[in-house]
Image (spheres, helix red, strand yellow):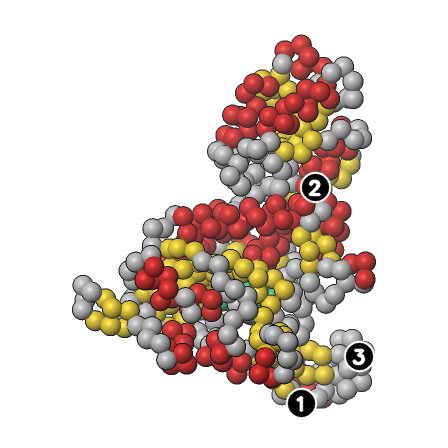
């Protein structure tokens, strides 16, 4: 992990060529991610998580929750509604300032973010070519486009009934600051964490699940005494990077990117992104933000309710400052998939393997009978049944053993347990390691304990 200066696409990131297309294909083939409403031709940049995708997403979320809520006595969780009083978004500044500059090509009517077009940014619209139709210099003037989705609450569809789909989960935390602090008697410094859906009407979504219009965030607002925010900002940077590394992400594909003054969101005084080196360049998937007392201050002003904290030992009242850690759950999942994807040649054949950390894998093990006879299927079924409940186990009897191994390699299953001829003699099974391809024998009676140790204790989902 490094501190960054450049943001160029990375030719030498070590990813296999054409990784993004390969990931999209594998994600569909193995049941990780599907296009939403696919049978109707899809819908703009919304994705569904399939049986393996939801397992992986749940694992990431559970590990995050364990790290960010259960680990610290002074952090608690909440689950706020997606729909909120619209005044929340006026107070937070999102109605006025959560915008991107939008331009349209007058020839093909495609729309772009003006800040994605370098010549336009440089003040030379005549030199900027449209990437869709190739026309040069036919741009409308930029206008500010608000990214919040609107809908109506109640039976009358008019301006007064407008509500927004939240564009960040953070505001559900700020408006509950007082409720949480008083109900569970937390003292500053303390944090409130939340995982949930967020929605943004992105002008240029893309790169598969990297930028979508519906996504999930894992956010934590840490309330601190004014004057201590810079210290906490550095502390949370360190803690968050350590957690990301604990997922098994390659450290040479991780770095911090500190925001320049022109990059800062309207609520931020300081921000540092954790970036990953995707095949399409260095990009953020988590931000650590110093939000000052901006949000509590604005909500205090707009709601007319006091949100100050009384610091008894210091005998003073203040609005706490906030250090926010804001990670995209769906984007972290893309980082995990991109980092785990690998190809190699084994016995003259290409092998595709997801080298997921065992604690993240959708299935911790697969159980196979070598052949469908000789009592092997029954023993395999019994073993799978015994392991279920503690582990997520896949039981497969279809196709050759080689094909079953390949399917599990693509699913990222770290261990395959095979019931074979020797099992009938000595009640052991073959355990094949996904990464090294080594095979060892483990007694059937000891498989659960062996697997527990190999995946890091209890089932990650337990
Ligand atoms: N509460 C602060 C906040 O929302 P942000 O930098 O706008 O900050 C935080 O978003 C994280 O949410 C990003 O680092 C990214 O992982 C995720 N995110 C934001 N927009 C997204 C989108 N359109 N699709 C997927 N993930 C997104």
- As drawn, the label of residue 161 is none
In the picture of the structure, the residue carrying the numbered disc 3 is 134
Residue 424 placement, left or right of 265 = right
In the picture of the structure, the residue carrying the numbered disc 1 is 141
CA separation in Å, label 2 and label 3: 39 Å
x, y percent for residue 75: 37, 55
Does label 3 point to a residue whose CB lies under 8 Å from ligand 1?
no
In the rendered view, would you say 120 is above or below 441? below
Residue at x-position 75% and y-position 75%: 131
Q: Sequence-wise, which precedes: disc 1 or disc 2?
A: 1
x, y percent for residue 188: 29, 62
x, y percent for residue 436: 62, 32
Residues at badges 1 and 2 in contact (C-beta under 8 Å)?
Answer: no
Q: Sequence-wise, which precedes: disc 2 or disc 3?
A: 3
**Mark 3: secondary structure:** loop
Foreground tag (2 vs 3):
2
**Mark 1: secondary structure:** loop
Q: Nearer the viewer, residue 337 or 192?
A: 192
**Mark 2: secondary structure:** helix
Q: Sequence-wise, which precedes: disc 3 or disc 1?
A: 3
Residue 11 placement: quadrant: bottom right
Residue at x-position 57% and y-position 83%: 160
Q: Tell me which image quadrant ligand 1 sits in.
A: bottom right
Residue at x-position 72% and y-position 45%: 30
- As drawn, the label of residue 410 is 2
CA separation in Å, label 1 and label 2: 47 Å
Residue 19 visible to the viewer: no
Residue at x-position 74% and y-position 50%: 28
């Amino acid at each position: 992990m490094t501190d960054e200066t450049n943001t160029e696409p990375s030719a030498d990131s070590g990813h296999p060529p054409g990784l993004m297309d390969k990931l999209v294909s594998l994600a569909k083939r193995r049941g990780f991610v599907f296009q939403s409403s696919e049978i109707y031709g899809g819908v703009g940049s919304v994705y569904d998580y399939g049986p393996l995708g939801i397992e992986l997403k749940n694992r990431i979320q559970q590990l995050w929750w364990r790290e960010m809520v259960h680990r610290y006595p002074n952090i608690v969780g909440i689950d706020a509604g997606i729909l909120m009083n619209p005044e929340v978004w006026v107070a937070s500044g999102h109605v006025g300032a959560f915008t991107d500059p939008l331009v349209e090509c007058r020839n093909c009517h495609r729309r772009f973010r003006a800040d994605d077009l370098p010549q336009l940014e440089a003040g030379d619209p005549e030199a900027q070519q449209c990437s869709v139709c190739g026309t040069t210099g036919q741009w409308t003037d930029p206008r500010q486009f608000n990214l919040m989705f609107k809908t109506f609450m109640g039976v009358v569809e008019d301006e007064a009934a407008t509500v927004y789909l939240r564009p960040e989960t953070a505001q559900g935390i700020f408006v509950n600051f007082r409720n949480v602090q008083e109900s569970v008697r937390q003292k500053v410094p303390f944090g409130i964490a939340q995982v949930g859906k967020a929605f943004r009407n992105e002008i240029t979504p893309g790169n598969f699940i990297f930028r979508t219009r519906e996504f999930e965030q894992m956010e934590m607002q840490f309330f601190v005494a004014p004057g201590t925010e810079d210290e906490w900002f550095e502390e949370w940077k360190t803690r968050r990077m350590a957690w990301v590394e604990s997922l098994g992400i390659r450290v040479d594909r991780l770095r911090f990117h500190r925001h320049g003054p022109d990059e800062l969101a309207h609520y931020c005084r300081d921000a540092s992104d954790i970036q990953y080196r995707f095949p399409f360049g260095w990009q953020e998937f988590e931000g650590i933000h110093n939000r000052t007392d901006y949000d509590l201050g604005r909500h205090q002003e707009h709601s007319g309710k006091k949100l100050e904290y009384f610091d008894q030992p210091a005998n003073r009242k203040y609005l706490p400052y906030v250090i926010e850690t804001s990670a995209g759950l769906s984007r972290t999942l893309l980082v995990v998939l991109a980092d785990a994807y690998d190809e190699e040649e084994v016995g003259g054949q290409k092998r595709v393997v997801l080298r997921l950390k065992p604690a993240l894998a959708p299935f911790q093990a697969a159980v196979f009978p070598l052949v469908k006879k000789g009592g092997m299927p029954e023993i395999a079924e019994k073993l799978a049944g015994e392991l279920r409940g503690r582990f997520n186990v896949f039981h497969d009897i279809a196709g050759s053993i080689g094909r079953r191994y390949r399917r599990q390699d693509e699913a990222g299953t770290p261990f395959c347990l095979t019931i074979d001829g020797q099992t009938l003699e000595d009640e052991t099974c073959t355990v094949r390691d996904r990464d090294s391809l080594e095979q060892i024998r483990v007694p059937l009676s000891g498989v659960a304990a062996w697997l527990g140790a190999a995946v890091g204790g209890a089932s990650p989902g337990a």
